[in-house]
Every structure is written in C-alpha cells, then in structure tokens.
Amino acid sequence: MSGRRVDLRNISHGDQEIARLTLTGADVPWTHAEVEELPGFEEFRPLFTEQERAVDEEGWERADVCYTQIRSALTMTFPDGSPVAEFMLHIHDDGTAGWRRHDESFDAVNQ
C-alpha cells in the first residue's frame, strides 16, 4: 500500500450512492475527476448527456434546466461525508467529470 490519500467525492440520489469521483486535478474554478459509476447512475446518464450537448451547442437555457434537474435530484459529499452546499457538476461520456462548488447554497447567498 502506497499510503497515498485518494481524494473522493460521492454523488448520491437520496440514500443511494450512484457515483464516486476520484480527483485528478484542478483548473480553478473547476475540479476534475475520473468517474466510477455505481448502480443507479444509468438513470441520470441521459441528463448528463443532454447537459453536455447543450453546453457544446451554447444552449444555455437547456444547460440551466439540466443543472436545475441535477441539483434537485443529486447530492455531492466531501470525503468526510459532509454535503457540498452548492455545486455545478458535468459528467462526460468519456468517464471524466468537472465541477465547481461553493461553500454556501446559492439560495442562502442570494437572500
């Protein structure tokens, strides 16, 4: 065992963990990872595919709708299990992910 710490984020739908993100790097404000898909992820694959297509086509309204659907259905947690307050997650068809996060919910920030 190398003793190297692996930095993970977990993606859950309700109580079911559906993906693990292993950090591979960062390009502030984006963080990048490899995605380990778990049972339950398949349900969300079309949503992530649509989001990626919308961004590629600069369909920002469609991308916003996807973002809202992702955030209302999924949670992201830090390695210690605490929730990430706010995040914008993109999971790509090539098995990689990128996300931005904020320490406070956007609802709390905008009040």
Image (tube, grey):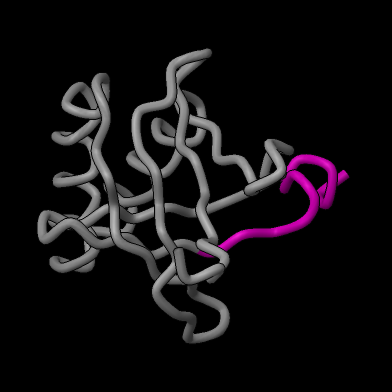
The outermost residue toward the front is 1
Residue 86, horizontal then vertical, whole percent: 65, 48
Between residue 71 and residue 54, name the one nearer to us: 71
> In the picture, residue 28 is in which quadrant?
bottom right
Residue 47, horizontal then vertical, whole percent: 22, 36
In the rendered image, the quadrant that contains the N terminus is: bottom left
Residue 11, horizontal then vertical, whole percent: 45, 36
Does the segment drawn in magenta span residue 69? no
Give me the residue at 24% from left, 38% from top: 37
Give me the residue at 57% from left, 65% from top: 5
> In the picture, residue 68 is in which quadrant?
top left
Magenta segment, which residues? 100-111
Residue 25, horizontal then vertical, whole percent: 44, 79
> In the picture, residue 81 is in which quadrant?
top right
From the viewer's perspective, tell me whether residue 26 is left or right of residue 61: right
Give me the residue at 50% from left, 26% from top: 72
From the viewer's perspective, tell me whether residue 45 is left or right of residue 85: left
